[in-house]
Image (spheres, rainbow, N blue to C red):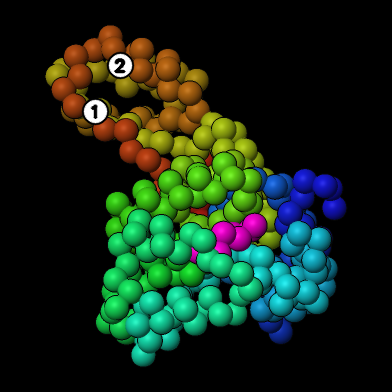
Amino acid sequence: MTDNATIVCEDLTKFYGDTRGIEGLNLTIGRGEIFGFLGPNCAGKTTTIRQLMGMLRPTRGSASILGLDSWRDAVEIKLRVGNIPGGVRLYGKLRVGEHLDYIDRFRPGAAPLRPELIERFGLDVHKKVKSLSSGNIQKVAIVLAVMHDPEILILDEPTSGLDPLMQQEFYSLLEELRQKGRTIFLSSHILSEVERVCDRVGIVRDGALVDTQSIEDLKKKKLRHMDVLFRERVDAAEFEALPMVTKVEASNNRMRITVQGDVAALVKQLARHDVEDLTFTQPSLEDFFLGFYGEEVDLDQ
């Protein structure tokens, strides 16, 4: 392990009987990095996180955090790591403040970020957990994971259930933690989320890591759709000739242009025409995999 590495997986593999969870995962994440783990549902993301947190014993291979073995040293790791699991479950009979107290007692030392996080995420500490909406439960999970200012954060779909304002607050929090040198491993199936906060991304499909990319390289490969309404009929051929355009669909004065990579030349070409309306949509995860692999993917598999 290099001096800068905080999370290392070596041939990390987990099978459930004959079913593969994750196989042959080799990965090194550096200090102060936000690393996105991107893939469809059931691709192996949660299995990987459960092994990192010492909740599952690998079938073969190993995972380590801060030089500690994730299975053998799981107790010590949990004191130094903040974790938001997938499908958060809390103790419904406790009040929010009581729940924070309960978890805090498992950790030595203070929880220095607790008051700030309660205020930032608008938690009512007097409410019973069982009365909370899914979004408020997720906010409690964020506070539980971060309040002790851990060295590492391991997050499984952390914005699930959050409204857009709270998502933005969470992204701001991650950036602040990154600036403090914290390392963040973030599993997601939301492409825009990974692009927004991560430095680098690992792409996982069918239980295997198929590639790692910087976010800048990732942006160059994704497909995006530009829907244009012209004031007059325009020949689609002039856009089909542009090197970054992969597909053009035209109907009367409307055109959908699918583009991969830099859009500067496309924008210049559009400027030669009288455009009434223009929409540039962010790609879905399906579009991303189509652009990255040249094939479609079933996100529920």
Q: Residue furthest front?
A: 109
Percent x, y for residue 126?
Answer: 29, 78
Displayed quadrant of residue 152: bottom right
Residue positioned 60% across, 53% down in the render: 184
Secondary-structure class at tag 1: strand
Res. 278 mark: 1
- Front in this rendered view, residue 296 or 57: 57
Secondary-structure class at tag 2: helix
Q: Residues within 10 Å of mark 1 (few under 14, many from 20)?
A: some
Residue 28 on the magenta segment? no
Displayed quadrant of residue 234: top left
**Can I make out residue 133 in this image?**
yes
The amino acid on which the numbered mark 1 sits, given as a three-letter code, is: Leu
**Can I make out residue 295 in this image?**
no
Residue positioned 42% across, 53% down in the render: 170
Residue positioned 16% across, 17% down in the render: 232
Mark closest to the chain's N terminus, 1 or 2:
2
Res. 270 mark: 2
Horizontal side of 259 relative to 82 (left or right) equals left
Percent x, y for residue 145?
Answer: 52, 66
Residue 152 on the magenta segment? yes
Give, as a single range, the part of the protein colored magenta. 146-156
In contact (CB < 8 Å): disc 1 and disc 2: yes
Q: Residue furthest right?
A: 1
Displayed quadrant of residue 115: bottom left
The amino acid on which the numbered mark 2 sits, given as a three-letter code, is: Leu
Q: Residues within 10 Å of mark 2 (few under 14, many from 20)?
A: some
**Figure check: 91 above or below 61:** below
Res. 69 mark: none
Percent x, y for residue 51?
Answer: 69, 72
